[in-house]
Image: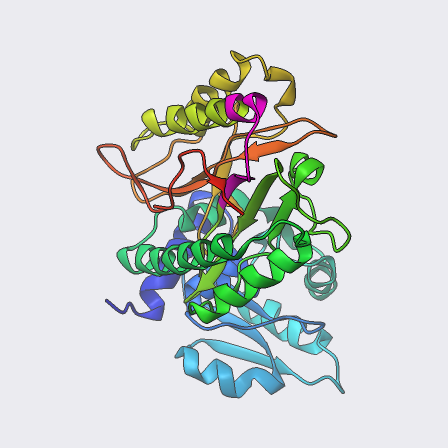
Amino acid sequence: MATSLAYRLAPYASVASDLDVDAVALVPGPNFMRAVQHSFSSHERPFLLVIPAHGPAAALVPNLELGSWDLVGFDGAVFDWRDQDGYNAAFAGLTKHLSISSLAVEGQVMRVFVHHALKTAQPDLTIIDAEREISALRMIKTKADIAAMQAAIDLSERALSRTLASVKLGQSEKQIEQMLVQMLFEEGADDLAFDPIVAAGDGSARPHAKARQDYNVKAGDALLIDYGARKDGFCSDITRTVFLDHVTDEGRAVYDTVLRANLAGLAVTRAGVTAHEIDDAATSVLEASPFADRIRTKTGHGLGREVHEAPYIMRGNHMILPAGTVYTNEPGLYEIGNFGVRIEDDVLVTEDGYETLTHFPKDLTVLPC
């Protein structure tokens, strides 16, 4: 069901009130997109939406974006500026109009020059980082959000199935990556969620490896593929590790350990659990194995409009996960110079437990290539 702009802005006003600041400022990015339901880019041009705790919102908009901004249905004050004139006068007009003394911003998104422009316009303005509180509004996904994520996941899994069916010994990692990307777009992706990780052999031991043009996959290799698609503004993020032609006893044992860790994380998932508890359950399985020295990463992260967003599934993070949260469950084991295994699912937290949105098989797979 469509919601009004006023309805979507209200939670940001509540954040300002809860933090005891006069307003919240959003810049183009996932929170901005969630609020206005239209995509805008900053490039070198500042673009700002300010939502006071009380009273109407105001915006600073590049003049060339005014036509697109009209589509948002915004009825507050708009301060536009042209490249030829610069943006300082617009910032001065915005701050004078708002008459605020404190502002909460997205610390991981707002660029330094926008911060400086605000302070130039109003030197006594107090600016605080409210990234955690602002981004937390995206944790609980709507039915429409989940439907978009499921579409991204489903097409991604179809693409992976087609790609694995085409893998042959002697292909380079780069060739396999190119096949995967082609399949993602053929299956209906709007864009890639991130640059895929396609890594075989010793490359699979590097959690964020880049596909190599000069490495040709060979029999016995672990082939790790971590990838995702973007559909209707939402992301998928999936990892599967398979073995080519045959698997060693070591490979089988490592894979079994990672799979058990993945399942242990799922077993404790439910509304009200903390990120710490999920990571602890999964990591404890890895630590109790003969491969504890191969642990290199936390268990996962939130997923939605961004590939990495709150909550971060790691020990020490005692954030409670409400129903509607989607996170990645991706334990792994990596031995540099040897191989690595990661198994990643996208998981919806429900009141009674969880729903695994990914359905691609997790049983140990040996490709007869």
- Residue at 40 percent across and 61 percent down: it is 155
Which of the 4 image quarters holds residue 248? top right
**Residue 311 seen from this side:** no
Decide which of 19, 134 is in the foreground and name it. 134
Position in image of residue 343 (x %, y %): 48, 36
Position in image of residue 194 (x %, y %): 58, 56
Left or right, 291 with reference to 354: right
Position in image of residue 257 (x %, y %): 48, 22
Left or right, 164 with reference to 205: left
- Residue at 70 percent across and 77 percent down: it is 89
Coloring scheme of the render?
rainbow
- Residue at 74 percent across and 30 percent down: it is 337
**Residue 143 seen from this side:** yes
Position in image of residue 185 (x %, y %): 49, 69
Decide which of 27, 155 is in the foreground and name it. 155
Q: Is residue 156 above or below residue 36?
A: above
- Image quarter where the N terminus lies is bottom left
**Residue 246 lies within the magenta run:** yes
The residue range painted magenta reads: 239-253
**Residue 329 lies within the magenta run:** no
